[in-house]
Image (cartoon, rainbow, N blue to C red):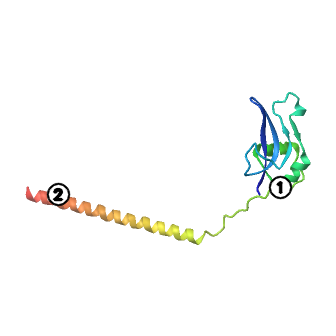
Amino acid sequence: MAVVIRMKRTGRKNAPCYRISVADRRFPRDGRTLETLGVYDPISPVPDLRLKLNVERARHWVEKGALPSDTVRSIFRREGVYDGLPEEKKKRDRAGRKPNASSVRNREAKKARGEAKKARHAERVAARRAAKKAAAEAAAAES
């Protein structure tokens, strides 16, 4: 089960409020959740009420492998959820990796087909030029 941490929209028109929740990736945005971690109210007049977050539970889900959305990730960074956690694994450099043998064969076959096509085209062009030249010589001989 792929678990994500995202925001569920609540509140009324032109007055958004969001619940930061943990859900299965397959569930809809405002659908069923596994757990609610907090509330984010971006237009609250009181700065202390804009964000309520259970940092311990958020850290627990991140440690278990839940993937936060971009917005939730930035909120977690501000709140210190990632403090003390190991950094994300970086992709290893695979520049020296040998290419797949089937892709090499396919590339060579494609190159051979292109060369054969060029040869056929050159033959057709040469035949047309020879026919045109013969027709011009025949017309010159008649006149």
Residue assigned mark 2: 136
Amino acid type, callout 1: Glu
**Image height of 18 relative to 66, above or below:** above
Depicted 105 relative to depicted 49: above or below: below
Residue reaching furthest to the left: 143
Query: 37 left or right of 8?
Result: right
x and y, in percent, of residue 102 in the image: 56, 71
Pick whichever, 92 or 40, lies toward us. 40
Residue at disc 2, secondary structure = helix
As drawn, the residue found furthest toward the front would be 32
- Picture coordinates of residue 56, whole percent (x, y): 91, 49
Query: Circle 1: is it few (<14), some (14-19), or many (20+) Cα within 10 Å?
Result: few
Q: Residue at x 12, y 57 (%)?
A: 140
Instruction: Report the residue that reaches farthest toward the top.
Output: 45
Q: Which residue is mark 1?
A: 87
User: Which one is in front, 77 or 99?
Assistant: 77
The quarter of the image holding the C terminus is: bottom left
Q: Quadrant of residue 90?
A: bottom right
Is disc 2 surrounded by few (<14), some (14 to 19) or many (20+) residues within 10 Å? few
Q: Nearer the viewer, mark 2 or mark 1?
A: 1
Residue at the image position 30 percent from the left and 63 percent from the top = 124
Q: Where's the N terminus, which quadrant?
A: bottom right
141 or 99: which is nearer to us?
A: 99
